[in-house]
Amino acid sequence: MFRRLSDRASGEVTFTFDGLPVRASAGDSVAAALLAAGVRACRTTPVSGAPRGPYCMMGVCFECLVRIDGMDNRQGCLVPVQEGMRVETQHGARALTTEPAQ
């Protein structure tokens, strides 16, 4: 369903998704890179645990929420992929902490 355009010329970056290396084109959003790599689900719902994946690709629907470098609730469609980035599936709702915000 998703494939890269053959005329796109850009560099390549590598990041991890759930501990596995993923290669992406520089400038891709995290969500676009995951879709291009064949990943269809990047989070589970808080209520039923159903898998969800990127949908609108413009920050409206919140279906592409992932954990990036230890921070929950990041919209993958709005975050450019970077070399060495750690992306993880977000399971359910974001964990709340009692630590004050910095």
Image (tube, rainbow, N blue to C red):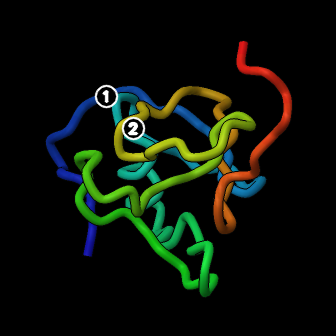
Image quadrant where one finds the C terminus: top right
Residue at image coords 48%, 34%: 81
Q: Left of 26 or right of it: where is 88?
A: right
Dot 2: within a 10 Å radius of its alpha carbon, few (fewer than 14), some, or many (20 or more) residues?
A: some
Badge 2 amino acid = Ser
Tag 2 near tag 1, CB within 8 Å = yes
* Residue 5 higher or lower than 24, as above or below: below
Residue 78: percent from left, percent from top: 36, 37
Q: Which mark is residue 10?
A: 1
Task: Read off the residue under disc 2.
Answer: 25
Badge 2 or badge 1: first in the primary sequence: 1
Residue 22: percent from left, percent from top: 59, 50
Residue at image coords 68%, 46%: 16
Report which quarter residue 56 is drawn in.
bottom left
Q: Secondary structure at mark 1?
A: loop
Report which quarter residue 43 is drawn in.
bottom right
Q: Left of 68 or right of it: where is 52?
A: left
Residue at image coords 14%, 42%: 7
* Residue 3 higher or lower than 1, as above or below: above
* Residue 45 higher or lower than 28, as above or below: below
